[in-house]
Amino acid sequence: MANRIHEIRDPIHGFIKLDSEERKVVNSRPFQRLRYIHQLAMTYLVYPGATHRRFEHSLGVMDAATRIYDVVTDPENIYHDCVRELIPRKNELEWGYWRRVLRMAALCHDVGHLPFSHAAEKELLPKGIRHEHLSKLHILGDHLKPLFAELKIQAEDVAKLAVGPKYYGSGLSVWESILYEMIGGNVFGADRIDYLLRDSFHSGVSYGRFDHMRLIETMRILPREDLESEEPELGITLGGLQTAESLLWARYFMYTQLYFHPVRRIYDIHLKEFLGEWLNEGQFSIKLEEHLGMTDNEVLAAVLQVAGDQSLRGHEQARRIVDRQHFRLLYESSPLDLVLNLKSVELVYEAARLEFGDGAVRHDPYESEGGSEDFPVYLRDGNIASSVKLSETLRQGPSFSVDYVFVDPESKEKAKMWLGENKVKILGA
Amino acid sequence: MNRLDRASLLVALTEKLRASGSWAGETHVQKATYILEKVLEVPAGFEFILYKHGPFSFDLRDEIGTLRTDGFFDWEVKSERYGPSLKAGPLSDALKQQFPTVPDKYASEIDFVASRLGHKNVAGLERLATAIYVTLNERTPADRRAARINELKRHVSLSEAETAVEEADKLINEAKAQFANVMTA
């Protein structure tokens, strides 16, 4: 059969193109499963439009990663010998090989996700296992590996770029590390570009937009001369600095408005507790065939069933989700209280538990991921400088964290009065 | 080690690096923490792999971001030429006051690392930390370790790698002599 080009219409990237061999990967069971995994868990209970799935996000990441690859490997965009030595020459076999590997890694980077994405990952998998480990197993497994062989690429290379050095288990070369950054990079990898734009589009939180086309056009592979090192990293030219700043702001707004919305966070907790009771042995299976058969659909069907039957495990949590009887926010981290006591949230949580009982109070500390916005910037005079040095916005840029204490709706008013009367004593001020 | 004790340790290490003349960028803190944890066995709880400029911890990267958000660290641009430095943030005094135990307990180890890394730039740190990583993980003769570094980091020449291996062996031996608990190499 001729290797035709197929187009998939996408609200973020226009038409996403792939050939017949690549389409076999899209049509595989591990990838089709992503049609039934919500990108933002139960966020749709707060933002009704946020019903999009990992399926279209993964296609978007493939498209964005491909654009990045084509820009940064264009000979006109390579300014340094140490970078030139690293990158395969455009249109040679090796260049095409890594382009294909990158596309498939971007496409498959999320195939290991549990139902409802991140909502319950840490607690409901065996210790030390994350969805990236399952993505790696699927990529090296019976459904996908033969398809990569047909594409004449090594499944191991796809796995490396899909999950990155932290989860692959052995070192990546400098070139492979840069390719991984194109997908999962902390500052402006394709994954981040797509999820911000897509989550913004579907949720209606329009602050999440930024000029991603301009950002990608300005990306370059640059040695960190500003750090006196020749080791190259993904950076941008000076012309892209403002759109990189706008990405940072987009991220800040999306986290504060959407990802950290307290009602969204408490639904994650209710769902996690439901799953802990409902699942056999309180955890998801990491057997691949069982993982393939477990999606949001199975979990939602169970939530509805269990909510209607008091005798079933997880009834209380299922009822809270179905009847919208979620816990309410009692207290959150505040800069003024932190000055008084750095453990203010833990202390309020412990005191509230003693006052209202274990079952009536929940604590939701969030540990942020992703480091600084420090990346190399190519200046008009040919020098390279740190983004943080050049941009006041990136240096002083907004940061965010949350640390919430929730209380059951029945105790809310009483708890608020109690906290008002006792907070100073609790914080030891 | 709990979250705030670890934060207090990282702030103390960064301040000591700065006092020893270090530019104290994120890479400096990464490599100094690596040596503190893997050579001097201070149990900060970070896992390192070979990645950006040598041994690198994604968890530490996230932790530094969190510490900035929490007000324990701040960025500072000290020089026209170099990238940004980390410095103690507005809540660091409260942290030091409320969580002094861990930095006090490991003061000698922090001094040891800061005195040996304070003068190094990123390229020098990259070579030394990579040599220590290879030494701790491969335990092969010096020439093979140097060849391995050259293979892993193409921009590090063989002669630079040989010097780095010598320096790594010296640092590890000094650590063994000074701290009884050091088990490495």
Image: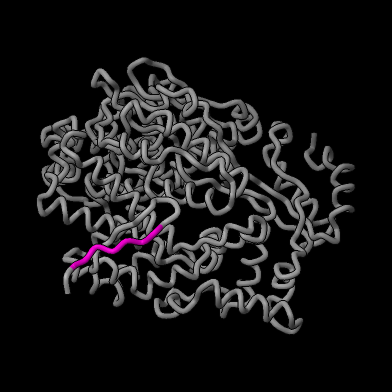
Is there any visible trace of residue B155 in the rendered image? no
Residue A129 locus on image (x, y percent):
44, 64
| Principal secondary structure, stretch drawn in magenta | strand
Q: Is residue A256 above or below residue A4?
A: above
Which residue is nearer to you in this view: A142 or B16? A142
Q: Is residue A4 magenta?
A: yes
Left or right: residue A372 compared with residue A298: left
Is there any visible trace of residue A355 in the rendered image? yes
Q: Is residue B117 above or below residue A113?
A: above
Which residue is nearer to you in this view: B180 or B57? B57
Residue A277 locus on image (x, y percent):
64, 75
Left or right: residue B79 compared with residue A220: right
**What is the image's colouring?**
one colour
Q: Is residue A43 magenta?
A: no
Left or right: residue A266 compared with residue A136: right
Residue drawn at the location 38% of the way across and 65% of the way down: A135
In magenta, the rendered stretch is: A3-9
Residue drawn at the location 22% of the way across and 52% of the way down: B138
Residue A138 locus on image (x, y percent):
34, 70
Q: Is residue A251 above or below residue A298?
A: above
Image quadrant where residue B82 sits: top left
Residue drawn at the location 21% of the way across and 50% of the way down: B139
Residue A307 locus on image (x, y percent):
72, 77
Which residue is nearer to you in this view: A154 or B167? A154
Q: How many numbered discs sit on the rendered protein?
A: 0
Name of the residue lying farthest toward the top: B80
Left or right: residue B124 compared with residue A334: left
